[in-house]
Amino acid sequence: MQLSRPFTRWLLLTTLLVGARVFAAEPLHVQVDQLIAKQAAGKPFAAPATDAEFLRRACLDFTGTIPTAEQTRAFLANQAADKRTKLIEQLFASPKYAERMAEAFNIQLMERNGDNAEWRKFLTESFRANKPWDQLAREIISPDFKDEKLRGAGWFITRRLDKVGQQDTDYPGLTRDVGRLFLGLDLQCCQCHKHLTVKDYKQVDFNGLFFPIQNLKMQAAGGDYKTAWVQEGLVTNKYEFVSVLSSVKGSTGPRVPLGPEIEIPTGTTKDELWAVPPDPKTRKAGVPKFSPLRELAARLTAADNPQFARNLANRVWWQLMGRGLVEPLDLHHSENPASHPELFDLLAKELVEHKFDVQWLVCELAQTQAYARSSVLPTSADQVPEQLFLAAKERPLSAEQLARSFLLAVGEHERVVEGKGWAESDKKKTFKDFEKAFLAAFANDAKEPELTVNPTLKAALFLRNNDQVLWALQPRPGNLIARVAALKEPARMADELFHAILSRPPTTEETAALEKFLTKRAADREKALGHFAWAMLSSMEFFTNH
Amino acid sequence: MNPLCKPWEHATSRRQFLGASAGAMAFGALGGLVSPQAAEAMRKKEKQVLFVWLDGGISQLESWDPKPNTEFGGPFRTIKTSVPGTHFSELMPQCAKQAHRLCVVRNLATKDNAHSSGVARIQRGDPKNRGVPYPFFGSAIAKLMGPTSSKLPPYVWVKPGSGGFKTEDAGFLGPKYGSLAFGDGKPPEDLLRHASLSADEDEERNELRELLNQRYAAQRRPAYTEASSFVFDTARELMKREHIFDTSKLPVKDLDRYGRTELGQHLLVARNMLEAGVRFVKVASYGWDTHGDNFNASASLVPKFDRALAAIVEDLAASGLLEHTLVIAMSEFGRTPRINGHVGRDHWPEAWSIAMAGCGVKAGAVVGATNDKGTDVKDKGHDIGAVFHTWFRALGIDPKKTEYNNNGQPLPLAHEDMEPIKEALV
């Protein structure tokens, strides 16, 4: 329905006058900014990001790497009023978009707990097809190992149920992660008793989710399928648990946390119980008719489970804004409200209306003023509470973003990808080797949520002394140092260095600093250039998406 | 000259970042205003820990608690020590000379006789189960006391085998409190300055980095840049002292005193690290699980340990560091008095010994006793929880007043039903 302009204007006016609800026909990104402004209550916002800042941010977010020096120059020279919208469109159309989304969701969902090609392929293809989030989540929570295209999704479960040494199969860990990552509920503490600090979380919530998960049996790779897989056991009775604090007993069927219990069918005959009965001759376990996991996945991801949409809204918001509307990301409950409750509800509602269209949400958020603000604070840091989103929050680059951006900046990306780059004792290293070294130095430890800036000694030593890092800073035909060294004039040299590494022109002081340094180290200008580039590459400006 | 002050001169501003750990207090005390000599003197007064781990279980009967001429005593004699009335096994002649500096507890009675769970259980102090993995002692100290004013990493582990950044000890404290491990006593990858760089160049490029950071951080939140500067400074401090990590440059005279053995070398590296100001140094030695041929094995193993431990205790005492350094030598359990069919001794958590020295513990003391055959403790023994209380007290930390905060979950430092071993404390 097309509304007449005066009517819209009138509505807008009443909205402003009453100061109440925003008008629903506005695009989401407009409403987001209105609600952010409302909460800011007159506090000053940071200036809009400069073109250079915006370009770098969007390229990192939607293609996973910094822009090239040429891209930066072209964007800065472009005078079109809608160049930012056009840029976003271009980036979304790039094949890199799906890869970047798969990478970001892989980090969130697997938390550095190993790598698996089939899983990555599943994620990438899902994002390439812009698969609705509810469908994607169902395919992960209740994987269909029969379907070769979807089997990769099963790694989320099988990786977590892998036996480690003599430890018990980590069913509680998988339960916790399903709750955290798909619902924003960390129910771990309720495994053995009621939650001591969160009154909404009950022991029945953990155990209702735990029930179908502990019913899974790992099946080794190479049997029915090439990959490891899980099989469900027969469930006919409720699951019983007891509180270690109060000794009170409870029981539950499979249950969506904070949601409804799923009824267990009451059948008793072989036909009622089994889709494929167990075969005593071959000792093959049967396939029960009732699949608690499939039922759970269906209810958990349903449009009427508000927590499912809220969690996605919060995690996508976090991905682009550096801070969730609810923090911590996995501790949603009534006594820990969102920083912007109205906005939070709106995002969740719209997600449901848009059938969990992740790309739509990302695209809307990318068009907000909130996303396009500078990270330069408007006033002193203590006057800018993070939760008001007055300025863009700095976000650390992932190890993958760093590895690619580093190689791109120093002009060695192609050589390394072609396997003609860095070598160790005559053995040529691939891009994967390069990325692996960056992952080892910069990624969080396995099973640590990678949510915060975490500079480490390991990373500092890697940057200072690692062979690969220093190799990239030696002059070589076509690379950054060789290119810059050929320029002679300090202003042009600084211009090239800063566009290539920091995706912006240098300031006068920075050009002067380079000139001074080169004069001092005139004996070996190329090496000096390498040092200067190193300082830029290990600076905070390079390391953060700001 | 660069007109900018150097980042490492900002010890006080860095306190904000360190604020999370109690170490900030010791750190701030220096404030950058004292002379280097005074700073060095104050550095030496900061509390430190040397933790010697004999993995597999040293036999108490062949070391701290011999029972000669008894059913299970084995073939070795006892010898007098520097403390009248105290005897050690004859395999410990060097430690016997240091007995007046040692504090031996002979009545440990702990709970786990399996290596796989016992190692972690002992090094975590076996607190009540709270559903979270507790930190090992080294990680606990890294958290509670932080780095010393040397700014060197607070928890270093010298061990045979692989090195690197070992995070598993940290438990719920998080990987940042894990150890920096020197595998085979050698520095981890990338620690030494790259061969292509001179010290000057390295310093200069780092100053450039700080210059760029200052411009960037000027109008942004300071926390990230400070955290980054902190790790770069730590890297710098470590690299500056690369000579102490180079085992090829260890002085011959010292090597002979410590013994030209793996444990000897590693304890010598540990001494250098303690002198340089590492808060907590763990040295691990493997192969103490003498189920078979215990006596020949002990005759080979124990003297290596004896010599190295005695040498480091003597050196720390001579340099004055011992007064502020808590030295601990122990395993996950002792060994059975009963000698098995393979002339070996098996696992025995029921009655065993540990040795300590230095900061806060009673020098020359022997605490508790086992019965005549060494099969059980006399009276009541001490569990590892009590030992943890003792160590925390020795270091000036009161586990009754301090607790961990694990994302809002308060957790005691040590088993809350246990008490320190008073007889072992000064």
Image (cartoon, rainbow, N blue to C red):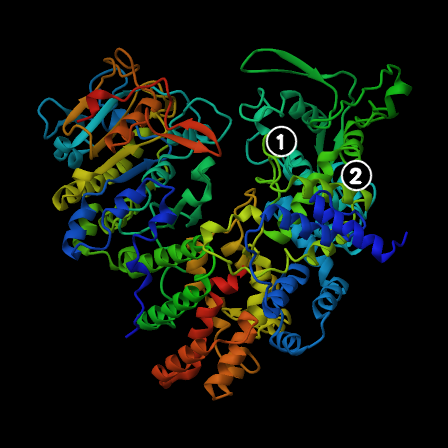
Relative height, residue A114 to residue A265 (above, below): below
Disc with the residue nearer the chain's start (2 vs 1):
2
Relative height, residue B423 to residue B272 (above, below): above
The C terminus of chain A, quarter of image: bottom right
**Residue B373 — which label?**
none
> On the picture, is A524 further left or further right than A149?
left
Place of residue B332 in the rendered image (x, y in percent of width and height, measured from the top left)? 37, 29
Q: Nearer the viewer, residue B347 or B394?
A: B394
> On the picture, is A313 further left or further right than B204?
right
Which residue position is annotated with label 1?
Answer: A333
Element type at mark 2: loop
Which residue position is annotated with label 2?
Answer: A224
> On the picture, is A105 further left or further right than B121?
right
Q: Nearer the viewer, residue B190 or B304?
A: B190
Res. A457 in view: yes
Q: Chain of mark 1?
A: A
Disc 2 with disc 1 on a shared chain: yes
